[in-house]
């Protein structure tokens, strides 16, 4: 690989990588975007769903860590799946990831804009036009920061995630301190029982729960820029620690929600759930810590989606799946500047197109449910790649068999079940967005094949 195609190696340390992984999942934004739907469908059983999804996602983190030791590549799923199953399957994983990142950019820009308007112009917070314009502003600003270099992006993430997590910890602490007087229910061990969930509830819970954790794999997309030269384990270990930290944070935050808000209050809050929780637990103006956390979280995950999209596109272009311009690295910033610019253009176009949906809630709901299909696709392929590549580990001791084959395989099976079982209930619009986005990948794949034959 020539220096013209090399990213800024060693730019991130292990701690910075973990922060990027946690920020990629965007705890405050995710709770606001998806927790209301989860509580509306599962009630108190949402707590168990959060834990089980964390266990499943830990299996995917293990798969990423295992395979990242074999192939350290900014393409993440695209690269490792392609290495194990061949270029065609690698493209499928990469395209599913790209479509997921594209949808997530819209889903992240909307709450960032809504939270900004709640602070600056509360009467405009539910106005779709104002939300889209404000979202486009944040999208452009964050894309510029990502374009300037990974160190700039990392500094922004560290600043945002510290403030975000501090606000979340304050809310959790207030909830746990006040729960004897404010609690609407008493915790029960049955909340964690898998036997309390029907097959439909299990599928719904996992589909939403996967969204809670998804985004930690930005650590793998940044693997070429993480750790000292030759340290292939830095980003993989960061992925594991990111999932562990997210499990702890989500479990405590969901517990605070369940103890403080009734099912009707939580499900009815929609994207304003975190603000409603903050308002219940904290006096004014401290309840606006929830809005600040939501805004910073959404902006932070918007940045990680841009990083993931641009690095995946860069890696796939470097291998000839897309035009070689997207594999070019800026001579000074050491970022895939062409790929980042096209991400910005696509994001703004998708955001403007989403303005034709009637409400902010419609944009979020359609994006999040459709995202689940793409997430299941490329993460399942990654887990299957780990199980197949390391299948001889079944003969090399219990610990290695579990971490390299069994756990990733169980995670893959759970995600396949979620995708198959949930598809009939997603609705026409969501199914078209989810499956249609995947099907569109056949066009660039065939074009790449044609270019290779012509070369």
Image (tube, rainbow, N blue to C red):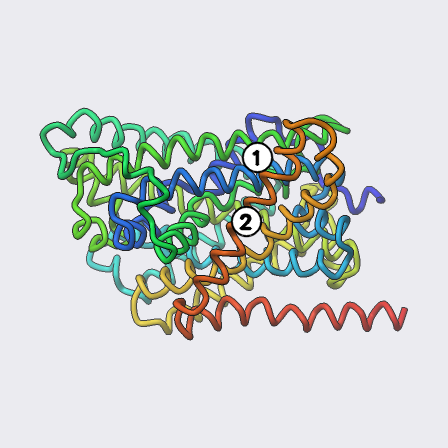
User: Is there a contact, CB below 8 Å, between mark 2 and mark 1?
Assistant: no
Which of the pair 9/249 is nearer the observer? 249
Q: Residue at x 46, y 70 (%)?
A: 431
> 255 and 78: which one is in front?
255
Q: Nearer the viewer, mark 2 or mark 1?
A: 1
Label 1, residues with CA under 10 Å away: few <14, some 14-19, many ≥20: many
**Left or right for 62, reference 257:** right
Q: Which of marks 2 and 1 is nearer the N terminus?
A: 2
Q: Which of the 4 image quadrants contains residue 123?
A: bottom left
Q: Which residue is drawn at 70% across and 39% down?
A: 67
Residue 72 picture location, percent across and down:
73, 39
Q: In which quarter of the image is the N terminus?
A: top right
Mark 2 element type = helix
Which mark is drawn over residue 354? Answer: none
Give the residue furthest to the right: 455
**In the picture shown, does residue 340 fall above or below 22?**
below
Q: Quadrant of residue 235?
A: top right
C-alpha separation, residue under disc 2 versus residue under disc 1: 26 Å
Is residue 452 something one can see in this rendering? Answer: yes
Q: In which quarter of the image is the C terminus?
A: bottom right
Coordinates of residue 287 in the picture (x, y in percent): 20, 37
Q: Is residue 295 visible?
A: no
Looking at the image, which residue is at 31% across and 48% down? Answer: 35
Residue 239: image tag: 1
Where residue 370 sits: x, y (%)? Answer: 46, 63
Is 10 positioned to the left or the right of 210 in the image?
A: right
Residue located at (57% from left, 42% from top):
60
**In the picture provided, is 145 more to the left or to the right than 357?**
right
- Residue tagged 2: 144
On screen, residue 399 above or below 70: above
Query: In the depicted view, which residue is nearer to us: 411 or 131?
Result: 411
């Amino acid at each position: 690989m020539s220096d013209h195609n090399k990213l800024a190696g060693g730019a991130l340390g292990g701690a910075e990588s973990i922060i990027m992984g946690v920020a990629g999942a965007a705890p405050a934004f995710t709770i606001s975007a998806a927790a209301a739907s989860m509580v509306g469908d599962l009630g108190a059983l949402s707590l168990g769903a959060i834990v089980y999804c964390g266990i499943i996602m830990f299996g995917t983190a293990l798969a990423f860590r295992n395979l990242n030791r074999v192939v350290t590549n900014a393409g993440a799923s695209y690269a490792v799946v392609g290495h194990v199953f061949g270029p065609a399957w690698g493209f499928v994983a990469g395209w599913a990831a790209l479509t997921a990142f594209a949808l997530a950019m819209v889903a992240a820009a909307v709450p960032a804009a809504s939270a900004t308007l709640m602070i600056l112009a509360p009467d405009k917070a539910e106005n779709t036009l104002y939300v889209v314009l404000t979202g486009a502003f944040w999208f452009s600003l964050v894309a510029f920061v990502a374009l300037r270099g990974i160190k700039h992006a990392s500094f922004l993430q560290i600043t945002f995630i510290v403030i975000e997590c501090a606000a979340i910890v304050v809310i959790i602490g207030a909830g746990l301190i006040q729960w004897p007087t404010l609690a609407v229910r008493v915790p029960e061990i049955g909340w964690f029982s898998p036997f309390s969930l029907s097959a439909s509830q299990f599928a719904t819970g996992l589909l939403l729960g996967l969204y809670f954790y998804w985004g930690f794999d930005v650590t793998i997309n940044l693997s070429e820029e993480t750790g000292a030269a030759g340290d292939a384990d830095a980003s993989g270990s960061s992925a594991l620690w990111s999932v562990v930290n997210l499990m702890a944070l989500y479990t405590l935050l969901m517990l605070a929600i369940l103890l403080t808000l009734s099912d009707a209050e939580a499900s009815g809050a929609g994207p304003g759930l975190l603000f409603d929780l903050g308002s219940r637990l904290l006096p004014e103006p401290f309840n606006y810590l929830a809005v600040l956390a939501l805004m910073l979280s959404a902006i932070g995950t918007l940045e990680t989606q841009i990083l993931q999209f641009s690095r995946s596109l860069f890696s796939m272009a470097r291998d000839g799946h897309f035009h070689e311009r997207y594999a070019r690295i800026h001579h000074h910033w050491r970022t895939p500047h062409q790929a980042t610019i096209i991400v910005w253009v696509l994001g703004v176009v998708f955001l403007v197109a989403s303005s034709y949906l009637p409400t902010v809630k419609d944009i979020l709901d359609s994006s999040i449910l459709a995202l689940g299909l793409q997430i299941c696709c490329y993460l399942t392929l990654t887990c299957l790649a780990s199980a197949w590549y390391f299948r001889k580990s079944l003969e090399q001791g219990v610990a290695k068999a579990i971490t390299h084959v069994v756990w990733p395989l169980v995670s893959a099976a759970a995600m396949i079940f979620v995708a198959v079982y949930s598809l009939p209930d997603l609705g026409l619009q969501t199914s078209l967005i989810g499956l249609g986005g995947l099907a569109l990948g056949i066009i660039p794949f065939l074009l790449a094949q044609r270019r290779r034959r012509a070369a």
